[in-house]
Image (tube, helix red, strand yellow):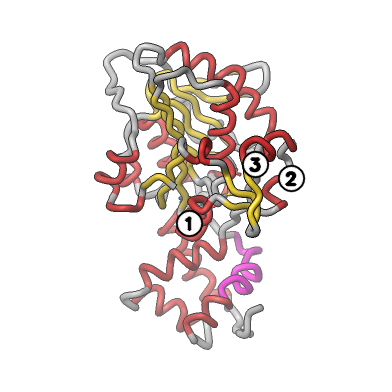
Amino acid sequence: MSLSSAILAPEEFKLIRELILRYCGVVLGDEQRGFVERRLRDRLDVLGLSDFRSYYRYLRFDPAGAHEIEDAAESITTHETYFLREEYQLKAFRYEVLPALIEARSSIRRLALWSAGCSTGEEVYTLAMLLLEAGIPSGWDVRVFGSDLSRRVIAHARRGVYGATSFRACPERYRQQYFRSTPEGMEVSREVRALCHFGQLNLVDAARVALIGKLDVIFCRNVLIYLNDGARMSVVEQFHRRLSPGGYLFLGHSESLLSTTTAFEPVVLANDLVYRRAPEVGENHEIATPQALATRIGGSKWRSR
Ligand SMILES: C[S@@+](CC[C@H](N)C(=O)[O-])C[C@H]1O[C@@H](n2cnc3c(N)ncnc32)[C@H](O)[C@@H]1O
């Protein structure tokens, strides 16, 4: 519980939310002032500051402000996620998209998936489990990348240990097969982990996103709803560039590209509506690898688990 009882005045809220918007594209409505006040009081405690004016000055002018904005953004963003979230979408992925991609990529025998805004990693491990369920053809190079703005959730994802709430939609069979019980919680099996790689990445940082190699599937679920129109448009444009021709984009159930772009073609499947980058000729088919990402995006940030 926060010790601070500092009040976030409307003017200070406007200044702070402007910094957050510029940093990560997350938009905060006037009605969220009370929520932001409660969340950021903890940051005031940590930094030993008595009011939000000082906090704004710290964010804006202190050399450590660039680092603090990460903590501020992490405090006010939603990180809720769980294994096998939105079953109908995952069915579309497992039974419709995956077989089509396996056929389409049979000459290069590689598949690269990206969960953009993966929070604590449940979505990444879900995709890896579904790949194993589908049976990866032998000799294929298959990787699932997970990224998030928050370093804390990425550290959790790399640890791969989860409590009961993460399993609220997960059939018991998956728990039995792909996890082992430890005193800290259920730990993801080696077989699943072997496919997964995590890194911190701000999706509005177009220069860094542009360094990612080509992908076959992007899952970006329950992330775009928090972004303003400009950020959403630029992120979706980057997704289009990063997808190989014929690659798929999965959004959250309440998200669509209707007012964002017409660059993707909607594909109506039996289980869901998904988006696809139209197949093209003469594109660069370089596939993302953890090594390439670590070299180009930076040091140890993008690595296996
Ligand atoms: C509600 S979670 C979604 C997790 C998962 N995709 C799912 O649907 O279960 C949203 C995540 O998006 C991340 N996020 C928000 N803005 C982002 C940005 N600009 N770049 C990268 N991640 C961002 C947040 O840190 C948060 O962990």
* Residue 299 belongs to magenta span: no
**Residue topped by disc 3:** 83
Left or right: 198, with 8 as reference point: left
User: Is the residue marked by circle 3 packed among few (<14), some (14-19), or many (20+) residues within 10 Å?
Assistant: many
Residue drawn at point x = 57 percent, y = 63 percent: 76
Q: Residue at x 74, y 45 (%)?
A: 168
**Cα gap from disc 2 to disc 1, whole angstroms:** 22 Å
Q: Give the x, y percent position of residue 305.
A: 44, 47
Residue that numbered label 2 is attached to = 168
What range is drawn magenta here? 29-41
Magenta-highlighted stretch: main secondary structure? helix
Q: Earlier in the sequence, mark 3 or mark 1?
A: 3
Q: Is residue 254 above or below residue 276?
A: below
Crowding at label 2, few (<14), some or many (≥20) Cα neighbours within 10 Å? few
The mark found on residue 155 in the picture is 1
Asked if disc 1 is less than 8 Å from ligand 1, the answer is: no
x and y, in percent, of residue 255 in the image: 60, 37
Earlier-in-chain disc, 2 versus 1: 1
Task: Provide the secondary structure element on which disc 1 rests.
Answer: helix
Of helix, strand and loop, which one carries label 3? loop
The answer to which image quadrant residue 90 occupies is top right
Task: Count residues near mark 1 (Cα–Cα under 10 Å), then give few for <14, some for 14-19, many for 20+.
Answer: some
Q: 299 above or below 243?
A: below
Query: For the point 41% across and 49% down, which residue is it?
Result: 199
Q: Quadrant of the N terminus?
A: bottom right
Residues at marks 3 and 1, CA–CA distance in whole angstroms: 17 Å
Pointer 2 and pointer 1: residues touching (CB < 8 Å)?
Answer: no
> Disc 1 marks which amino acid?
Ala
Q: Quadrant of residue 130?
A: top right
